[in-house]
Image (cartoon, rainbow, N blue to C red):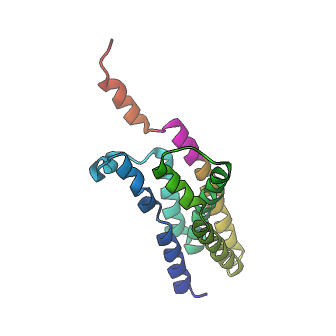
Amino acid sequence: MTNRAHADSLAHLVDICNEISERSPIYDELNLTQAEIDSVPVAPTAYAYITNMYYQFEQQGIDAGEASLVPCYWTYTEMFRKIAEKGFNTKPVYKDFIDFCASEEFGSVNQQMLDLTDDLAENTDDEGREKMRLAFQYSSEYELQYWNMCVIHEQWLLDQEQEKVARPLR
């Protein structure tokens, strides 16, 4: 596969599973305006994770960049399939998101992403494969930190300090 065809395939896969558009019904259910959504800062771990992906693409190349995306797709596929298998009781809007991530369509995109990454790894040298391995490792660690960030409601330290200052003393 040529670099152009590979890039087109990757762009198509990312477009099919646009996480932001899949969350849109959740925002609607919560009656959030775009201004309210935009006013929430990206949490530190999410910022670092996204920055890592950009770094991999821009500084390490498309091979490493693609490898940096794999943990996100793979985790969503496996995690939401397990949740769907076990069953859950939640609002329909959340169920729709979970069902989408557990779907065969999303699983197919994940498999295509894995196949494209394998193809890249087979067609690069040892240095390229090492960059891919590191990109995958870094993103895997960020993916784990991402889910922890959600559980603890991570915030920027300075935002936490501003909240303390804004609260009246009692």
**56 in relation to 112, above or below:** above
Which residue appears farthest toward the top when viewing the image?
170
149 is within the stretch colored magenta: yes
The answer to whether residue 141 of the structure is visible from this angle is yes
**Chief SS of the magenta region:** helix
Residue at screen point 35% across, 29% down: 163
- Quarter assignment of residue 116: bottom right
Q: Is residue 134 left or right of residue 32?
A: right
Residue 49 at least partly seen: no
Whole-percent x, y for residue 49 in the image? 52, 54
**Which of 139/110 is in front?**
110
**Residue at the spot 65% in from the left edge and 56% down from the top edge:** 81
Locate the N terminus by quadrant: bottom right
Residue 111 versus residue 44 in the image, above or below: below
Depth check, front residue: 85 or 135: 85
x and y percentages locating residue 64 in the rendered image: 60, 69
- Residue furthest bottom as drawn: 2
| Place of residue 132 in the rendered image (x, y in percent of width and height, measured from the top left) | 65, 67
What's the magenta region? Answer: 145-154
For residue 123, above or below residue 87 = below
From the viewer's perspective, tell me whether residue 41 is left or right of residue 123. Answer: left
Question: Residue 125 at x, y = what percent?
Answer: 70, 78
The C terminus, quarter of image: top left
Residue at x 50%, y 56% (from the top left corner): 96
State the residue in front, 127 or 136: 136
Q: Is residue 114 magenta?
A: no
Q: Disc count in the image?
A: 0
* Nearer-the-camera pick, 30 or 153: 30
Question: What's the residue at 38%, 29% (across, down)?
Answer: 161
Instruction: Classify 147 as above or below 64.
Output: above
